Image (tube, helix red, strand yellow):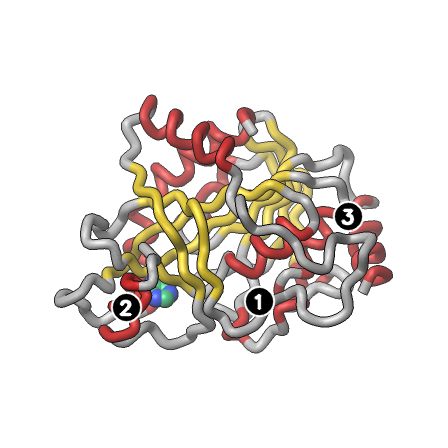
Amino acid sequence: MLEKIKESALFLEQKISTQPTVGMVLGSGIGGIVKDIEVEIEIPYKDIPNFPESTVVGHKGTLIFGRLNGVFVMVMNGRFHYYEGHSMKDLTFPIQVMNKMGIKKLILSNAAGGMNPSFEIGDIMIIRDHINLMGNNPLMGRNYDELGPRFPDMSEAYSKKFIKKAKEIGKANHIKLQQGVYLAVTGPCFETPSEYRMFYTMGADAVGMSTVPETIVARYLGMEVFALSVITDLGVIGQVEKADHLEVLHAAKTAEPNMIKLVRELLPQL
Ligand code: HPA
């Protein structure tokens, strides 16, 4: 594992001129930010040693290095999901590589179903905490003490400092921002009305199929995390409608300009 992380990091370091300072994982609803990046190099995942391959429609599979609003970033343009059959270790491997390359800050984004009745489709939610209901954890198995502790703390999984800055940016730019708890399931099916109700009762505001494994690994490694959800469908009690992937992608598109604006402005302030 340690050797593989080192090998992938070395491979990438040889291809870039500057050390990236922020890592990003682009989920649905923010992919368009790629056109704002002054790309130094874009590498398909399949060309990177030890990287898994991405298989989902609407999710690309390249790693981009470049400058975004003055910040040199390492961007996963498309992520790996547990439901694709990747192991938790494999799908979080790129976070290990980011850390090995010296990155200490991570921005994650995803599409999620909203359960909080005050949410609307197209809302952006700042994730303030999460609930892991994936039934697995990327830190299972042997621990490497040189990477992080056996029992890592999760009391502030999402940086309060980053959240505060994001809210200030939202206010200054008239971007409507929700804030809430993201609950992660494996997918790939969407939830039954009873499941949405259960998750809301448990204290979650939104549900999705990603992000939590990456956050857990990043915190374990001592990285600071900021994460956003685009609310693409509603699992609100009494008004659950049929959800499908294309609708999710469409709803995610409507939020995209504000997602991009927020992240662009936030980057130099992290
Ligand atoms: N549930 C789970 N994952 C999702 C949803 C949802 O309603 N919407 C987008 N990703």
Label 2 CB sits under 8 Å from any ligand 1 atom: yes
Label 3 vs label 2, nearer the camera: 2
Q: Which residue is mark 2?
A: 196
Q: Which residue is mark 3?
A: 100
Q: Is residue 229 visible?
A: yes
Pointers 1 and 3 in contact (C-beta within 8 Å)? no
Vertical order, 70 against 98 (above or below): above
Left or right: residue 50 compared with residue 186: right
Give the amino acid at mark 3. Answer: Lys
Residue at 51% from the left image edge and 31% from the top image edge:
161
Q: Position of residue 9 (x, y in %)?
A: 79, 51
Work out which quarter of the rendered image holds the N terminus and state it. Answer: bottom right
Which one is in front, 165 or 131?
Answer: 131
Give the amino acid at mark 1. Answer: Ser
**Furthest-left residue in view?**
238
Label 1 vs label 3, nearer the camera: 3
Q: Which residue is mark 1?
A: 54
Instruction: State which quadrant residue 250 falls in.
Output: bottom left
Gap in angstroms between the C-alphas marked 1 and 3: 22 Å
Residue at 68% from the left image edge and 44% from the top image edge:
222
Work out which quarter of the rendered image holds the C terminus and state it. Answer: top right
Give the amino acid at mark 2. Answer: Tyr
Instruction: State which quadrant residue 189 falls in.
Output: bottom left
Query: Which secondary structure lies at badge 3?
Result: helix
Left or right: residue 91 compared with residue 155: right
Write down which quadrant ligand 1 falls in: bottom left
The crowd level at tag 3 (other Cα within 10 Å; few <14, some 14-19, many 20+) is some
Q: Position of residue 243 (x, y in %)?
A: 26, 69
Label 1 vs label 2, nearer the camera: 2
